[in-house]
Image (cartoon, rainbow, N blue to C red):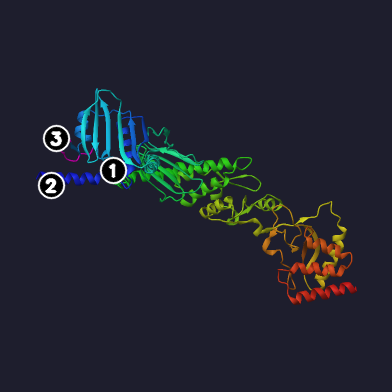
Amino acid sequence: MAGPAVDGVDDALDELVNQFSDPLSFLRELVQNAIDAGSHEVEISTSFETKGDAGVSLIEVCDWGGGMTREIIETKLTRLFSSQKDGDRTKIGKFGIGFVSVFALGPDVVCVDTARDGEAWRVLFDAQRTFKLLRLDEPIEGTRIRVYKTMTPLEFEVLARGVRKTVRYWCKHARCDIRVDGESISVPFAFSEPCSVEHDDGYSRVSACHPLDQRTFLGLYNGGLTLVERTEADFANIAVRAWSPHLEHTLTRDAVIEDAGYERVMRAITDTIDGPLARRAFERLDAELRQTLPSTLRDYHLRCAGWHLSRGLPDETLSAVRNEVVALSTAGAPLTLGTLLGGVRDDLLFLSRVPGPLSEAVEARGHTVAHGALETGDGQLLKIVGQRGGFGVDALVAHWALPLKLGDDVDPAPYARLGDATLRVFKEAGHKVSEVLFGHFDYPGSSLGGAVAIAQKEPFSLMPKSEVKTLGEGLFAWSRPVIVNADHKATAAIVRLADRDLALAAFMLAKLFFVGAGLTPSIDGALATAAARLEVG
């Protein structure tokens, strides 16, 4: 009966030794043991001694924890191994399971020096995993583990890089100072991104942020040691680290056991994202928009707030952020989330990149005009707000038009002569035009910069953009004034032409009104005939 029992233990030991895909993952287990022993620091070092064409590598792990007595060594650390003295092998125990993974590297020798309660011991393991226990004459503090393996210098270079990479991955957030070859590998658990939070509910410690690079990340830790890190999660474009003593890894360390503790931690992550992180996003956006000048992070803060609005805000969070500013009017007035969610006139909010006479006139009508454009971060956020508030968002210049009168510094005479002639051409051709006036279309925020002429019900009034080319038709229709863009290059050329050929200039100006707005051969012919009569007259 003894043979099968021993074989069973051997098989189990082999399985434990090879439980990790990366043989160097044993370093995580040694750090875990050091932390459990109360050490506040762990020193890991690598070195190489050349012997001919090869040499011996050394990985050394030192801690200053509680150490081990002989009883602990014999009943826990070496419980899975055969003693060179008596050949005895005991059953598998829980303590020491992590330590056995040191043999996944295939070492020639493993030496463990440790001391506790006035005892100092050395445990020597050979390549066959049998051990010898020796008493040390010199006292030491804590535990020192040395792993020796024969290899080439090139293999050692790969090993040394692997040690640093492995320890950084598994132990960067450990709750003690860990050094590899004299360099600390510790990384703060909290994120450094501008929009980030930490939350501790007594059960889980969660750090969450909006990454500047928008990469999704989820890291789960116990005691600060890595359980799993992945770039896929239910919350895209958010980075999260969660630390809880209730998270447990699988035997192979490649996943987390999804038990009740895991579910509770995931709920804590969700609560942190939808609560503190959401509030921070709107707080930071509010602060950004209240600055005199925008910072380089403006789009980032707009994106963060938009992410939470798209996801949906819990009632408690929504209540907390209703008074935060999420946009500015073109005049610079703050627009809060609560105000916008309350609705806007005609269920349509307008966007304009710059303030000007057009935005001022539309705001005077009671409409909301916010700074931004559809393709900018401001516009993208406001479209999301609009989806939640039940209103649309569109460019101001797509809906409204406003020509301005000529200034007092402009000589009206050349325009008046050409205007009178063009009015006669319009009327002779059968179009209901009451007067032809000249104005300014090219000003900041204008929607008429490319137009040569428009028609209006009232000259120089705010009007829907869709009506700028509409003339009265039918017997009972009112005649409308036509406003010509004095700032347009074509207009300037036609004004100069009028000094030489007034009839031709009037024909060209009248025709340009219809270009792109229903010019037909019959309209063109009627205008030409009217101009010819003007010339004869």
User: Can residue 263 be seen?
Assistant: yes
Q: Residue at x 19, y 29 (%)?
A: 71
* Eye-nearest disc, 3 or 2: 3
On the image, the x and y values in percent for residue 187 come to 43, 37
The location of residue 184, given as percent across then percent down, is 42, 34
Magenta stretch bounds: 84-94
221 or 473, which lies in front?
221
Query: Helix, strand, or loop for circle 1?
Result: loop
Relative to residue 467, is residue 24 drawn left or right? left
> Marks 3 and 2: CB-CB under 8 Å?
no
**Residue 362 numbered tag:** none
Q: Is residue 505 above or below residue 269?
A: below
**Within-10-Å neighbours for mark 3: few <14, some 14–19, many 20+:** few
Q: For mark 1, what is the residue?
A: 106
Name the residue that disc number 2 marks: 4
Query: Distance of mark 2 from mark 1, alpha carbons?
Result: 25 Å
The quadrant where residue 69 appears: top left
Which amino acid lies under the numbered mark 2 shown in the image of this protein? Pro
Mark earlier in primary sequence (2, 1):
2
Question: How many residues crowd around disc 2 within 10 Å: few (fewer than 14), some, or many (20 or more)?
Answer: few
In the rendered image, residue 92 lying in the magenta stretch gets the answer yes
Q: Quadrant of residue 449?
A: bottom right
Q: Secondary structure at mark 3?
A: loop
Which residue is label 3 attached to? Answer: 86
Q: Is residue 246 visible?
A: no
Quarter of the image where the N terminus is located: top left
* Front: mark 2 or 1: 1
